[in-house]
Image (tube, coloured by chain):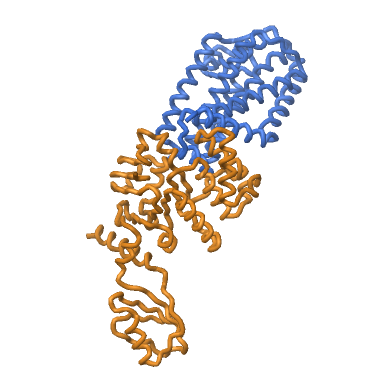
Chain colours: A blue, B orange
Amino acid sequence: MNVLIPLRTIIVKEIVRFVRIWPQTLLPPAITTALYFLIFGKLIGSRLGTVEGQSYMDYIVPGIILMSVISHSYANVVSSFYSTKFQRNIEELLVAPVPNWIILAGYISGGVIRGLLVGIVVTLISLLFTEIAVQNIFIALSIAVLTAILFALAGFINAILAESFDDISIIPNFVLTPLSYLGGVFYSVGMLPDIWQTISKLNPILYMVNTFRYGLIGVTDVNIELAFLITTGFIVIEVFFSLLMLHKGIGIKN
Amino acid sequence: MNALSIRNLRKTYNNGFEALKGIDLDVAEGDFFALLGPNGAGKSTAIGIISSLVNSTSGQVNIFGHDLKTDRSKAKCYLGVVPQEVNFNQFDTVKSIVFNQAGYYGIPRKRALERTEICLKQMDLWDKRDTISRRLSGGMKRRVMIARAMVHEPKLLILDEPTAGVDIEIRRSMWKMMQELNDNGTTIILTTHYLEEAESLCRNIAIIDQGNIVENTDMASLLTRLHVDHFVLDLAEPLLNIPIIAGYQLESITNKVLNVTVPKEIGLNALFNELSALNIRVVSLKNKSNRLEQLFMDLIDSASEGNHK
């Protein structure tokens, strides 16, 4: 069997799903981030001076773009796969000869595509407020894709383990949002007291945001190679656990 | 060749419940096979394992000679499953549900569109192809699941209580459709609580109870084991007392309707002679269609007695 056919089927199904509900999936980040840029970037930012030699608006743009990529790649997979489990249409995949890695790759691709699409929308919104002279497009794109993969995988694991709709909102509300806000989106860790600088460096999102910022505006608080290593390392671990859970049927088989 | 071959299949759930205690089962290619059992007997677990929705504890399942563990992909290609409950995305259109399933089986787009059209037309759903599935009636939803299960042309189709909760008209049309599929060469395994359905459609039967196969034979020889028949007599005049006739058991349903249990070795002639002698006029007679039900209950009762001993 040509495994690319089921892979393409899952990906197309996922894209159709989030495009069909675009007022819930693509429109809200455009509005939210426009407000971020207007309030924090323009109104408050214009009175704050510079951060690391950049205007405050320019400084927060990369973080806000990546924060949108993170939350939407995660949200797409967690909601889609949990609904598939909840409505039992996961059985359509389980009875068919679809290898587990294709199921995983299909859902992750759906999450990555939505995350990056939202990232593009937010980038376009940001261009209404500032100009971005991209410093290193390769670094910016590669860390954005890796970050989307990492959080799509996290969403997949959450969906597999979730037993109720409450369980799929706990991680985004109590883990993802605080880590994103404390991941150097709105500030440089250099502005924090030493102890908080050390604690912040345990937050993986800090590395991704700063690497993306480096790619866009050439400013970073972290070592770029270390950031790629951490991101890739998390992805490898998540892929392993996801495939293990699919193989054992955890959360999806009786 | 056997369409399905099961050897020593066991399933013990995490809570310690032993749902299957080492069952063996063969279903021949082209058969219309009934798998019956009371609720909780283990038939859903068995179907779940065959469909890869439940992991077995041990044992072997072969579908058209392909082992479900070692040759999973090929084994799955031969199998189509129509589950008991609706399990498709109710926000998808009828066409996309069937078309996507073809994609999961690796069928190229052009062929998948052809197969989707054929299956939806077969199920009389082509006019509803662009309808969001949650807007369909219960009977239509079941037919969508059959179309979906047939899209990759499986040689073995498992129908898990396909007519549960549908009205008699839909049930009859589904019987006709199942019969046509079987006539066209698809092996069918049917689970149902309507024993009349199994009796009229299936050639072979297995009865599962408490995780064991308690009977596995052909329908005709199973039915010949019945020692009694049940008839309903409509009388011309109402009866004040139920007559006592040696060898027969008579029960009144109403004062003009009698339920009679007739031992096969005695037959009906003696009964009518006695009734005539008593001046009781019978207007009409019909056979109660509960022959398999009677056997089913006998087998289940004797299996549970055996377990209690």
Residue B2 lies, with reference to residue A128, above or below; the image says below
Identify the residue shown where x is 34% and y is 45%.
B2
Pick the residue in front: B82 or B90: B82
Numbered disc total: 0
Q: Where residue B224 sits: x, y (%)?
A: 31, 66
Determine the residue located farthest toward the front in the rendered image. B184
Pick the residue in front: A52 or B26: B26
Q: Quadrant of the N terminus of chain B?
A: top left
Residue A164 lies, with reference to residue A192, above or below; the image says below
Q: Where residue B15 sits: x, y (%)?
A: 35, 44
Q: Quadrant of the C terminus of chain B?
A: bottom left
**Left or right placement of residue A204 versus residue B206 in this view:** right
Pick the residue in front: B210 or A13: A13
Identify the residue shown where x is 58% and y is 53%.
B140
Q: Can residue B55 be seen here? A: yes
Identify the residue shown where x is 28% and y is 76%.
B265
Q: Where residue B263 sits: x, y (%)?
A: 30, 76
Pick the residue in front: A15 or A119: A15
Identify the residue shown where x is 55% and y is 44%.
B88
Q: Where residue A60 sits: x, y (%)?
A: 68, 17
Residue B95 lies, with reference to residue A123, above or below; the image says below
Determine the residue located farthest toward the left in the rendered image. B309
**Left or right placement of residue B106 versus residue A38 in this view:** left
**Left or right placement of residue B183 versus residue B17 in this view:** right
